[in-house]
Image: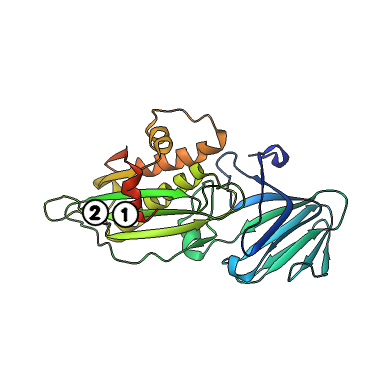
């Protein structure tokens, strides 16, 4: 049995961005233990506050469940609409705009859920995040079952450098396939895959998720050709010193909310027969991943 005390989780202020409105809104990430997932979070809308998003920012199905307070639901900002009371569940399809305003005196508490795609659900493991949007991975990188080795670059963050303030975070990883000599041409990856994650993540969390997504992807690809990661060597490089050192065990994690990420990354890496995880200069990430 796991118990998560939601109101004791850390609070982040949510700020507006193009296509979205957040006034008097705080968010608490559910980031404790193996059942945690920042794709599941608790929004707190202050009296008179509003949480709204237009169709361009809603790329996946989402649900809100009212735990406390009274709200007003509308399809556009500033419009009157349906009253939401305690115990109400409201669902929005991908591309559907919405506006939720607190019309009571007490804080309006909403559990927020993002629905996983079928492919993500099949690959889901206990972790600390679920992506809002993932671009389909192009099949450019063809693995070498004869050489049984690969290289991954990873990097994550937020467009304005302010992840954790309500903007959508991103992560990318590049896959390198060795040539006949077993060498990598690191000027350009054979394939680059980009993900967008839910708002409210820190830069460190986005870095971890980029690493985890890359490790999950390469594991699935190896298994899809009938081989096991235990027979492969994997090299991984990133420009986050914190992520590299924490996953390697050289640095301890002082922030409790990062521990689920560390555990998952270590578990994925330990599937391989051998692996390296090393730091490289940011210029390498920019050259290969574009950020």
Callout 2: helix, strand or loop?
loop
For the residues labelled 2 and 1, the Cα–Cα distance comes to 7 Å
- Mark 1 is surrounded, within 10 Å at the Cα level, by few (under 14), some (14 to 19) or many (20 or more) other residues, namely many
10 Å neighbourhood of mark 2: few (<14), some, or many (≥20)? few
Q: Residue at x 67, y 68 (%)?
A: 92
Label 1 sits on a secondary structure element that is: helix
Q: Colour mode?
A: rainbow
The N terminus lies in which quarter of the figure? Answer: top right
| Quarter of the figure with residue 249 | top left
Q: Which mark is residue 187?
A: 2
Q: Which residue is mark 1?
A: 288
* Residue 26 as seen in the image, left or right of residue 256: right
Asked if residue 79 can be seen in this view, the reply is yes
Residue 36 is situated, as x and y percent measured from the top left of the image, at 58, 45
- Would you say the residues marked 2 and 1 are in contact, meaning their CB atoms lie under 8 Å apart? yes
Q: Position of residue 189 (x, y in %)?
A: 28, 57
């Amino acid at each position: 049995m796991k118990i998560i005390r939601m109101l004791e989780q850390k609070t982040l202020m949510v700020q507006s961005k193009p296509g979205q409105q957040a006034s008097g809104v705080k968010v608490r990430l559910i980031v404790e233990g193996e059942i945690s997932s920042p794709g599941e979070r608790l929004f707190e809308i202050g009296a008179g506050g509003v949480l709204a998003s237009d169709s361009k920012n809603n790329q996946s199905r989402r649900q809100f469940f009212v735990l406390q307070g009274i709200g007003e639901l509308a399809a556009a900002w500033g419009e009157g609409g349906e009253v939401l009371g305690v115990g109400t569940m409201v669902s929005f399809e991908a591309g559907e705009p919405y506006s939720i305003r607190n019309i009571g005196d007490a804080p309006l508490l909403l559990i927020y859920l993002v629905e996983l795609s079928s492919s993500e659900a099949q690959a889901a493991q206990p972790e600390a995040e679920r992506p809002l949007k993932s671009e389909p991975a192009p099949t450019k990188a063809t693995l070498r079952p004869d050489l049984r080795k690969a290289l991954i670059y990873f990097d994550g963050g937020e467009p304005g450098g302010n992840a954790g303030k309500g903007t959508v975070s991103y992560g990318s990883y590049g896959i390198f396939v060795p040539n006949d000599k077993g060498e990598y041409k690191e000027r350009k990856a054979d394939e680059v895959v980009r993900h967008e994650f839910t708002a409210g993540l820190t830069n460190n969390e986005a870095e971890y998720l980029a690493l985890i997504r890359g490790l999950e992807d390469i594991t699935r690809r190896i298994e899809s050709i009938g081989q096991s990661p235990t027979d492969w060597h994997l090299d991984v490089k990133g420009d986050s010193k914190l992520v590299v050192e924490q996953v390697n065990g050289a640095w301890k994690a002082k922030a409790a909310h990062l521990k689920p990420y560390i555990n998952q990354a270590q578990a994925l890496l330990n599937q391989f027969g051998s692996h390296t995880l090393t730091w490289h200069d940011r210029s390498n990430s920019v050259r290969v991943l574009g950020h």
